[in-house]
Amino acid sequence: MRYLVLALWLVLGLASVGEQAFAGTPVQRLTAESMHECSLGRQAQSRADRVQHFASGQALGEQAVAADESSPDAHFALFCNLGEQLRVDGESLSSLFGFRRMMKELNRTLELAPDHLDALSAKGTVLVRVPGFMGGDKEKGELLLRQVITREPAAVNARLSLAKSYCAGGRHEEAVAIATKALDLAQELQRVDFIPEARQVLAQLRAQSAKGN
């Protein structure tokens, strides 16, 4: 089960949702609100608050999918909240079921929108983190993450995931450089939901780099 937990550190790092994003069609509003709850949950300090935000986000995402099953953003919003809930609960008995449901929403997003950058970033993260018997593919995952970074230079998630993968493969200096850029971007873009994690990842990679040298 520990592989499931590793796979669930799925940071999105591309689009931020503001209050103005709640305009639009009912499905668009539900989707934006669902993503907003996912973002608020990542910023929450207490476990209870995180669970509440992600549960609300899941409910909104399910409503959006029910209203328009063909909306890739609706599926992705649901994926976001499902994945973050699994991160909160850790190695629970329901993790395998939850992981499969989460992946169903991610894969459906990419079926509907193969170029969906948030989903590609999350997919790359999964591929580099899970073992082969669960569908992992480190080489393919790193390729996806590099492609996301090329297409969206401001992507924080893809940089952090790629940095961790590089460090695990012994490429410590490259990993630290990529994580440093991710933190710089998170601060520049005021991504308060990702700044703490970016700092933590960078500190861990620097420590591992020092040991490796």
Image (spheres, helix red, strand yellow):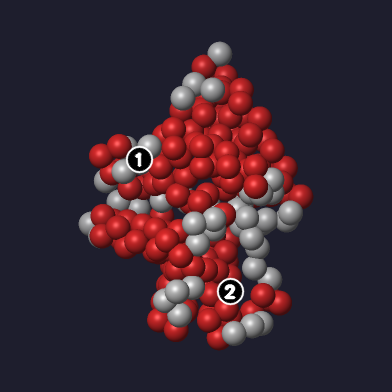
**Which of disc 2 and disc 1 is earlier in sequence?**
2
Q: Amino acid at mark 2?
A: Ala
Q: Which residue in the rendered view is the most extreme toward the left?
A: 93
Going 61% across and 23% down the picture, which residue do you hit? 173
| Residue 160 in view (yes/no) | no
Going 57% across and 64% down the picture, which residue do you hit? 39
Residue 69 point in image, percent of width and height: 42, 76
Residue 19 found in image quarter: bottom right
**In what quadrant of the picture does the C terminus appear?**
top right
Residue 52 point in image, percent of width and height: 46, 72
Residue located beneath label 1 in the image: 136
Indicate left or right for 94 with 175 as reference: left
In this rendering, the answer to whether 2 lies above or below 138 is below
Q: Amino acid at mark 1?
A: Gly
Residue located beneath label 2 in the image: 32
Residue 16 found in image quarter: bottom right
Q: Which residue in the rendered view is the most extreme toward the bottom?
A: 26
Indicate left or right for 21 with 143 as reference: right
Going 26% across and 60% down the picture, which residue do you hit? 97
Residue 155 badge: none
